[in-house]
Image (spheres, rainbow, N blue to C red):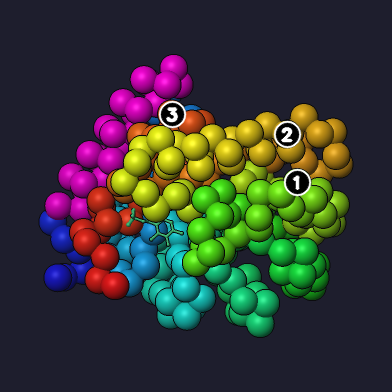
């Protein structure tokens, strides 16, 4: 693979945009209502640059180490970078300079740590609260029963701007089960934005849906799908 990346990257990006537009239309919404974040896990910097140049301006990393390694190589290729993986408290300071948003706040302790780090660098950082809507024990995210409490704590944090909620949907062959997990996140978001709690008024985003289930997520109200394999090919791991 050369610096232009796989030749079909732009094609695959177009196909994802078409799928998103169609799903949005079916849900009575428009393509503009749903952002497409490209999960660049395990990709080379050349591929990430190529996808940015092909028009994919919103990227996500789920591993701090990969984010730090790739960050400098993306200079000059305008993009926004979100952190979408499980974040250990001791990695917050390393990750912060490279991201405009952390989607995976799942505990009051992590929220406080990010808030302090953002304060030190004079920033207000966009964050999502990650909810484990499927209650699968292997998944990160705050339990649905504690999600509101956590969003209110995040809303109150001076250097965090709560943008919405994020989830990794249920891993199930049953579309109803997957759809239910996404509906659960949408219901929580609805409860957050009508709560009137300070700092929660901007929290309308729903980051949910991946390559295999973006249609279900958009039907349930997704405002941001996170796409990896459908654009970059099968996951190397
Ligand atoms: C890899 C990843 C995705 C994309 O998954 P695909 O099934 O490859 O589209 C989405 N969200 C997170 C958190 C990821 O780590």
Q: Is residue 66 above or below residue 147?
A: below
Quadrant holding the C terminus = bottom left
Q: Is residue 118 visible?
A: no
Q: Image quadrant of residue 142? A: bottom right
Quadrant holding the N terminus = bottom left
Q: Is mark 2 within 8 Å of ligand 1?
A: no
Write the residue at 77% across / 64% down: 108
Residue bearing mark 3: 219
The mark that comes first in sequence, 2 or 3, is: 2
Q: Is residue 29 above or below residue 154?
A: above
Query: As drawn, is 144 to the left or to the right of 99?
Result: right
**Circles 3 and 1 in contact, beta carbons < 8 Å:** no
Q: CA distance from mark 3 to mark 1?
A: 23 Å
Residue bearing mark 1: 148
Q: Image quadrant of residue 96? A: bottom right
- SS class of the residue under badge 3? helix
Residue bearing mark 2: 191
Magenta extent = 8-29
Q: Residues within 10 Å of mark 1 (few under 14, many from 20)?
A: some
Percent from the top left, x then y, of residue 11? 18, 45
**Circles 2 and 1 in contact, beta carbons < 8 Å:** yes
Write the residue at 47% across / 80% down: 65
């Amino acid at each position: 693979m050369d610096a232009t990346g796989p030749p079909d990257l732009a094609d695959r990006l177009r196909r994802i945009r078409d799928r998103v537009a169609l799903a949005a239309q079916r849900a009575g919404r428009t393509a503009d209502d749903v952002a497409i974040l490209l999960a660049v896990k395990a990709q080379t910097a050349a591929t990430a640059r190529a996808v940015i140049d092909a028009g994919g301006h919103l990227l996500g990393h789920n591993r701090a180490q990969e984010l730090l390694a790739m960050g400098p190589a993306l200079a000059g290729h305008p993009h926004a970078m979100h952190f979408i993986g499980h974040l250990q408290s001791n990695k917050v300071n390393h990750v912060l300079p490279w991201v405009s948003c952390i989607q995976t706040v799942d505990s009051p302790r992590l929220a406080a740590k990010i808030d302090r780090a953002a304060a030190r660098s004079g920033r207000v950082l966009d964050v999502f609260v990650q909810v484990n809507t499927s209650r699968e024990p292997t998944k990160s995210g705050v339990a649905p029963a504690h999600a509101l409490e956590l969003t209110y704590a995040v809303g109150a944090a001076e250097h965090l701007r709560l943008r919405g909620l994020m989830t990794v949907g249920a891993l199930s062959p049953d579309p109803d089960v997957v759809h239910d997990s996404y509906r659960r996140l949408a219901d929580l978001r609805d409860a957050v934005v009508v709560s009137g709690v300070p700092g929660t008024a901007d929290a309308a985003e729903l980051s949910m849906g991946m390559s295999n289930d973006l249609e279900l997520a958009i039907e349930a109200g997704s405002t941001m799908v996170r796409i990896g394999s459908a654009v970059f090919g099968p996951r190397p791991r």
